Amino acid sequence: MTTQETEQQRAEKSWQDGIEAYNDGKLERAGAFADAEIRFRFLGDVKRAGDSCSMLADAQRQNNQLKQAIVSYQRAVKLYQEAGKPLNEASSVLSIGHVERRQAHLDKARNAYLQARDIYRTQQDTQGLGHATLALGMLRCNEATSCTR
């Protein structure tokens, strides 16, 4: 077995460990995604490295580690840009908006939602465009506070 194959197996194992921890609700063990990211980047699989960052961010978000989640989503965005995966990029940007809205950073949330909307529009992804538009509408409700009453 070559070093490349061994490293690929290790990356896949870290990814699987992260998935199992995430699915079992053991979010403190989701750090396996950070290991997977490093290994996938080493292998040149930038898209899978981005997936690992995104999953780590999802776990951090569920664990109320909101600042860390934003950093992880931002790292995922950069990796998806490098990999040429605009829909994955848009999804991570949209998630950043959700975290910012949760923290009541409404201007940052709006900027993220608009950025995601623009990417989805450029890619002609109607479902993603719908998600971004809905998020912008919910944000307007947050700002007006009358939508929740």
Image (cartoon, helix red, strand yellow):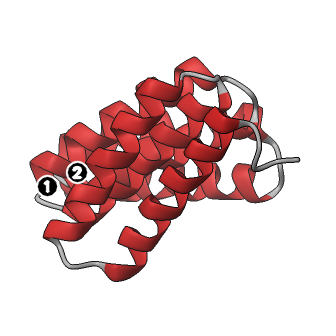
In the figure, residue 87 lies in which quadrant? bottom left
Query: Can you say whether 107 is above or below 145 in the image?
Result: above
Front residue of 25/10: it is 25
Q: Which numbered marker is on residue 83?
A: 1
Q: Quadrant of the N terminus?
A: bottom left
Residue 6, percent from left and from top: 32, 54
Query: What amino acid is labelled 2 in the image?
Result: Tyr
- Secondary structure found at label 2: helix
Q: Position of residue 100 (x, y in %)?
A: 54, 29
Q: Nearer the viewer, residue 82 or 99?
A: 99
- Mark yes or no: residue 48 visible: no
Mark drawn on residue 60: none
The residue identified by callout 2 is 80
Residue shown at 36% from the left, 70% from the top: 129
Rendered residue at 21%/59% (across/down): 119
Asked whether disc 2 touches disc 1, contact meaning CB atoms under 8 Å apart, the reply is yes
- Secondary structure category for the residue under label 1: helix
